[in-house]
Image (cartoon, coloured by chain):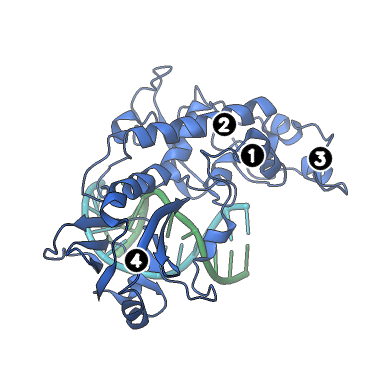
Chain colours: A blue, B cyan, C green
Amino acid sequence: VPELPEVETIRVSLAPHLDGRQFGGVEVWDPVAVRYPDAETFAAALPGRRIVRLGRRGKYLLVALAPAGRLILHLRMSGRLYWRDRPCTPERHSRLRLHLDDGSCLDFIDMRRLGGVYLPDAQGRGEPQGLSGLGPEPLSRRFTPAHLGREARRRRTTVKAFLLDQRVVAGLGNIYVDEALFRARLHPTRPVSGLTDAELERLARAIRAVLRDGLTMRGVSFSLYRDGLGRRGQMTDHLRVYGRAGAPCVACGGPVHRTRVAGRGTSFCPACQAPPTPDADADAAPGMGTSRGGGIGRDVHRARLSGRGGRA
DNA sequence: CGCTTCCTGACT
DNA sequence: AGTCAGGAAGCG
């Protein structure tokens, strides 16, 4: 559920309540929610440490601790974090509760049990695997059309799968990818290696635009998402394609379609987002000036995206 | 690279 | 009973 704007909204909502606080006791109702170390060690290691700063990287929430270490949380599909000024009865899917020194507490609730917390040791064991490999933050300077182009050139996949890959750019999920592709007027099955410079430029711009909107609206709330204080976001009403299958496209009035791309439900406007033209896409990018030496780039361009682009 | 799997719950 | 859900690691 939570993608970059949602996780950032949660971070901002929690920060004033957590900054400077010291952890007290830990209640673990579901040991699976503690990804590292084991639940017992975790519950013994956290109390006494102070929260220095709440940060975020991609969809990871990072809690810097004093005197050392950091707590890392990932909400995955259905995770929520609720801060309460005093402990209340845990709900059905509450997985753990972190008490704070002012009598408040932070609850981790996760229906599908896919999310969890990590408390890496001093040697760095226990870091979530994906964290170190994340691509640039899409709202940072490091995220540019040129970066997108460099990554795109060496991959043979659809632009949809490309954007969902956290190594390319950190923090996008299914909803914001569909929204970004709509705003960039790119069909989700376009082979990413065939995007022109102009299209990459549009795409980078669209990604930043949808994420900024998402942040302004404090996130998308379909059913489960809430911020750290239990408040819904308003972005749902501003989505242009996601969740609007069959409804008129906000740009052309034609019906929004829904299909499956990269194994995910995918919403798009078939009129505004031109489908891939296999030959053009396979050969579009000029072979000159490939950043990687040794002819790899050329081979990539020559290779046919067999079975995908051609299948209309 | 795509596909499967981890989970639970809602819906058809 | 079967399908699907906003994430992402692991497998072939």
Residue nearest the viewer, comparing A88 with A194: A88
Residue drawn at x 19%, y 63% as measured from the top left: A102
Tell me the CA gap for discs 2 and 1.
9 Å
Which amino acid does the dot numbered 2 rest on? Answer: Leu
- The secondary element bearing badge 1 is classed as helix
| Residue A277 placement, left or right of A303 | left
* Marks 2 and 4 on same chain: yes
Q: Note whether residue A59 is visible.
A: no
The residue carrying mark 3 is A290
**Which of the 4 quarters of the picture holds residue A46?**
bottom left
Kindly indicate whether the residue at mark 2 contacts the one at mark 3 (C-beta within 8 angstroms): no
Residue nearest the viewer, comparing A294 with B9: A294
Tell me the CA gap for discs 4 and 1.
38 Å
Tell me the CA gap for discs 2 and 4.
41 Å
* Marks 2 and 1 on same chain: yes
**Residue A148 bears which disc, if any?**
1
- The secondary element bearing badge 3 is classed as loop
Tell me the CA gap for discs 3 and 2.
20 Å
* Vertical placement of residue A40 versus A180, above or below: below
**Residue A50 bears which disc, if any?**
4
